[in-house]
Image (spheres, rainbow, N blue to C red):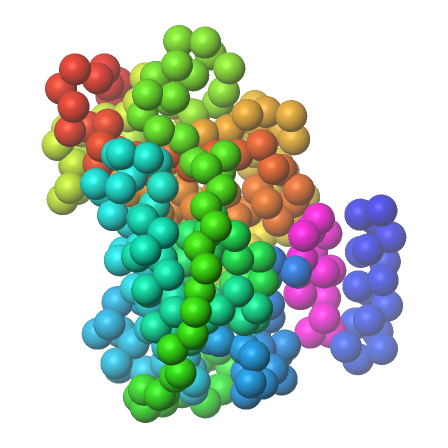
Amino acid sequence: MRNSGRAVARILVVLGFGFLATTAWAAGYARPELLIETEELAKIVNQPNVRLVDAVDPAGYQRAHIPGAVNVFYVDLAKLDERKKSGHPLSNADAERIFGEAGIDNNTQVVVYDGGEGPSASGVWFVLDFFGHKNVKVLNGGFRKWLKEGRPVTQDVPVVEKKRFLAKEHPAKVITRASVEKSLRAKDAVIVDTRSFNEYIGKDVRPGASRGGHIPGAVHLEWTKFSDKVNTFKTAEQLEKALKQRGIDKNTKVVTYCQTGIGRSTDMALAMRLIGYDNVVEYTGSWEEWSADPRLPIEK
């Protein structure tokens, strides 16, 4: 199947549709609908049921953004108290307020993007997916690719009509600290640290972390391994190779974590979902929670 997809992509190039060869469909993904290319977004951005979400910090949004985009800063979707209590990224009430004020209801087609770095957009995607919103696409390459192609940008903030977003949480997509500890004892999952190598070995202790190091037994697979030099996701074949090098296949139970549980680890979750690897859960408390408890063991 993968070889036939490549053959079709080559035919499209010959016919003059070379841009299609870089799309999610041509990259061999099991779920190409999770991504959208800049060419596709340009065609639908003004449609009434499309809500474009800029996931970067408010200052970056104010400097420039894609016309029509609203700002939902992904960091605001990671409430530590809620993550420690239930494993949920934030409460149902907060999710309904934030997304409703952004003009999103349960039928809205959401397209989310960031500066091109990846984690911000995947964080918003993950939270929407956790609360049951299935119609979400991530802009492949983000704002950086959009800007590089000379497409329009603005500083204008759109006026959006508030909508009713009904949050329906899916707790099976996340895991609590207590469950991570059980997995460590049972050795029934591969725990993956998606932070930088210096964070993993304890040399880089970032704000919010109480100690340096990593969860005992966690393998290191930095989130940057999932994108290429132009900040788009690598092909399915490349993603599968990176995962298999860490002993991960479709049947492997995977627990991902980063600093906050919303960002770098969700980028890995998105990459896995793209290629049909569904046995992945987010440790939403992540290193912020684990490192703060002196009773919990760490490795460096």
Outermost residue to the top = 185
Q: Which residues are magenta?
A: 18-32
- Tell me, yes or no, if residue 118 can be seen here: no
Residue 25 magenta: yes
Query: Does the magenta portion include 239?
Result: no
Point 51% across, 82% down: residue: 149
Q: Residue at x 39, y 69 (%)?
A: 100
Give the mark count: 0
Q: Main secondary structure of the magenta part?
A: loop
**Of 49 and 147, which appears nearest the observer?**
49
Front-lying residue, 115 or 189 = 189
Q: Quadrant of residue 237?
A: top right
Please name the residue shown 34% across and 73% down the image.
101
Q: Quadrant of residue 221?
A: top left
Percent across and percent down for residue 196 are: 32, 40
- Residue 168 image point, x, y percent: 48, 50
Is 85 situated above or below 97? above
Q: Position of residue 279 (x, y in %)?
A: 58, 32
Q: Is residue 85 left or right of residue 22?
A: left
Tell me, yes or no, if residue 159 can be seen here: yes
Q: Could you tell me residue 75's position as x and y percent?
A: 27, 56
Closer to the camera, 163 or 197? 163
